[in-house]
Image (cartoon, rainbow, N blue to C red):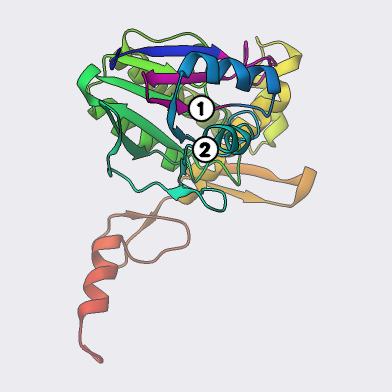
Amino acid sequence: MRRDRVLRILAPNPSVYTLEGTNTWIVGDAPSIVIDPGPDDASHLREIERAADRVGAILLTHTHPDHAPGAEPLAASTGAPIHAFRPPPGGVRLRDGDPIRVGDVTVLPIHTPGHTPDHVAFWLERARGLFTGDAVLGRGTSVIDPPEGDLAAYLRSLRRMRDLDSRTLYPGHGPIVLEAGRKLDEYLSHRSERERQILDVLAGRPSSIAEVVDVVYAAYPSEVRALAMRSVLAHLKKLEGEGRVEHTGRGRSTRYFIADPRACQRCGRPVGVRSNLCDRCRLAALQEPPGA
């Protein structure tokens, strides 16, 4: 029995979004855990069953169509339960931090929203391995696409994954990452640098998303422009939520600009564009008796 075995089965769905294809991970042996069965492809599912030998549980990092559709036919064939943050009928709902034990293998689900609200990573503590789904890729960066994607939540998830002090990352797409901490720091630094670039553009003049992309992604091929537009939108929504950016207009006429700084009416701390009080003073006001 190979309890520390981690085996990748590559799904036959390569694309600009999935790189070489979706990584299906088999953890442990007889019984095994299968993470992200990928598409409902008969040959791929047969290969998973052959390599897994006996499937004890099926885990989903999230329910995107390149990760999850194979779960139900695999469950029907093997009798293994499906565990997910949003499970299908008859599945098991994952809870943050509740261990999943199959044979001699134990993994912990870590709720990591941002790419999607239901995204979960799986922590193999004994081996310090983290299965990151689409939160961290083996090559390139993850797509954060509003409204499903939430950049502020994603950055919190990256920091939480970094705090686990993983040694190895097993991503949903791309190669294994052997220097986990460095990769997570690179992801955080990349988002911080992209935010600075966007703010630099807006500091010059109010701009549309397309105009921001023209500057920030000037050196990138045209094929990535659509993804770049969504990524810039994710950053702008985060900045608006923080009160650092505002917009005017609708549709193609929308222009984003740096927000005028506002101060809390009680203490003078910076507040968002839609607030008169900071969080601390708002809480204090709620606790005051009527008429105070």
- Give the residue at mark 2: 62
Instruction: Tell me if mark 1 has few (under 14), some (14-19) or many (20+) residues whose alpha carbon lies within 10 angstroms of its own.
Output: many
Q: What element carries label 1?
A: loop
Q: How far apart, in angstroms, are the residues tagged by discs 1 and 2?
A: 8 Å
Position of the N terminus, as image quadrant, is top left
Residue type marked 2 = His
Residue 129 drawn at (x, y percent): 30, 19
**Residue at (55, 19) in percent of width and height:** 48
Which range is magenta?
10-37
Q: Is residue 258 left or right of residue 255?
A: left
Question: Foreground: 148 or 56?
Answer: 56
Residue 194 belongs to magenta span:
no
Magenta residues, dominant SS class: loop
Q: What element carries label 2?
A: loop
Q: Nearer the viewer, mark 1 or mark 2?
A: 2
Question: Foreground: 204 or 49?
Answer: 49
Question: Foreground: 139 or 197?
Answer: 139
CB contact under 8 Å: marks 1 and 2: yes
- Give the residue at mark 1: 134
Q: In this view, does 121 lie to the left or right of 88?
A: left
Residue type marked 1 = Asp
Residue 187 drawn at (x, y percent): 41, 21
The disc label shown at residue 4, or none? none
Instruction: Tell me if mark 2 has few (under 14), some (14-19) or many (20+) residues whose alpha carbon lies within 10 angstroms of its own.
Output: many
